[in-house]
Image (cartoon, rainbow, N blue to C red):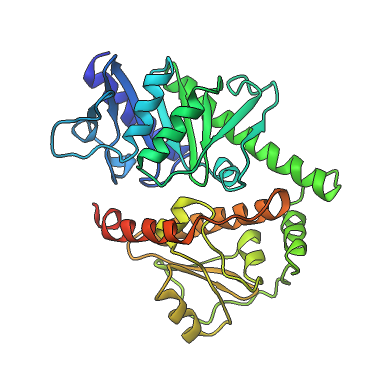
Amino acid sequence: MNINEAKDIVINAGKMLVEQGLIQRTWGNVSQRVDKNTMAITPSGRDYLSLKRDDIVLVNINTLEYEGNVKPSSEKGVHAACYKNKDVNFVIHTHQECASVISGLGIDSIDAAEQYTLLDEKVLCAPYGLPSTKKLVKGVEETLKKTSAGCLIMRNHGALCFGADFEQTFDAASQLEAACNEYLENEYLRKAKKTEFSEHEFCEYALKINGAKMPEAKGEKPDIKLGANLILNDSKEAAALSVLKKPLRPMVDDFAQIVGMKMKKVKNKESAILKALKKSDAVFVQGMGAVCRGKKEGDSEAVSMIVEKNCRAFLAAAVIGRVRPINPMESRLMRTVYKLKYSKQK
């Protein structure tokens, strides 16, 4: 394939992924095979909506070597593993919500209905490995050899989808999200002995397992001035977790990186909220939801989205399996690396 053609496909695919909500901001990555030994991949820490040809990096699939000053995605090894183990030409790594929630359940696979033609009736979960590490790549390689689906789930991380071209890979990502959502709802219905899914009842059931009840909606507001860099997430998931006694810990990698080691609950007092925000970029306000902080434009919305996803992962784990947060030492390492490196990238 022509190099510029490959780069243009990656750029357009990145925009489509953002538009469809399969990735947000710089989380996730996209690559296109150029030839047997080369892939064109998105750069590290760049906004997908502003990418140009010069931003897309050519990487050797076998050695992971590249030329130029632009660093390729830190997950280039995972992409290379796909090209080496599968007859595919396009790869995307997403942090799409339902697949990410599944990744936090600690299960080995989920069954997928026949209608999801690219999933081959089963999606496997690769063993956990810290982002950008050899352990992660090895786990992905081992899982790729076992699956015939067009995707897999990386435990506590997200999804990896691949196909003959970007259209097929997009379809695989969409089918995966639908299959994961279906799995979560059906497992809840089975466990709760219900016939119809309700988000409120799902949260209520998960809280009951944890000895708590859903808070009553009173229309209160946090005792702190909200704005562009400080917002309230009052979703059912965030409201549900705001009544638990124990802090919320990372169920998925991006929570550890961007929000912090743990998220505490405080009473609705400005001093308490501000004190908690010194150690984390989000805090639960009892019975209301989560106050989320961002330093730059759009950061607070990003934190809010990750908080909600991690809340849902916790609730799903409580209902379906067992709540197993990421190891504290690994969470601390991810948070430190993010603060020192990725948060400083343009």
Q: Nearer the viewer, residue 141 or 259?
A: 141
Q: Quadrant of residue 175?
A: top right
Q: Quadrant of the N terminus?
A: top left
Q: Position of residue 259 (x, y in %)?
A: 44, 62
**Residue 37 position (above or below residue 151):** above
Q: Position of residue 28 (x, y in %)?
A: 40, 40
**Residue 284 position (above or below residue 252):** below
**Residue 298 shows in this picture:** no
Q: Position of residue 55 (x, y in %)?
A: 22, 36
Please name the residue shown 59% across and 58% down the image. 311
Q: Nearer the viewer, residue 110 or 23?
A: 110
Position of residue 149 in the picture relative to residue 344 (left or right): right
Position of residue 96 in the picture relative to residue 119 (left or right): left
**Residue 50 shows in this picture:** yes
Position of residue 168 in the picture relative to residue 66 (left or right): right
Please name the residue shown 37% across and 20% down the image. 84
Q: Position of residue 45 (x, y in %)?
A: 29, 46
Please name the residue shown 53% across and 25% down the image. 171
Q: How many marks?
A: 0
Q: Nearer the viewer, residue 232 or 319?
A: 319
Please name the residue shown 54% across and 54% down the image. 251
Q: Nearer the viewer, residue 207 or 62?
A: 62
User: Which residue, as the protein is rendered here, is positioned at the far left?
Assistant: 68
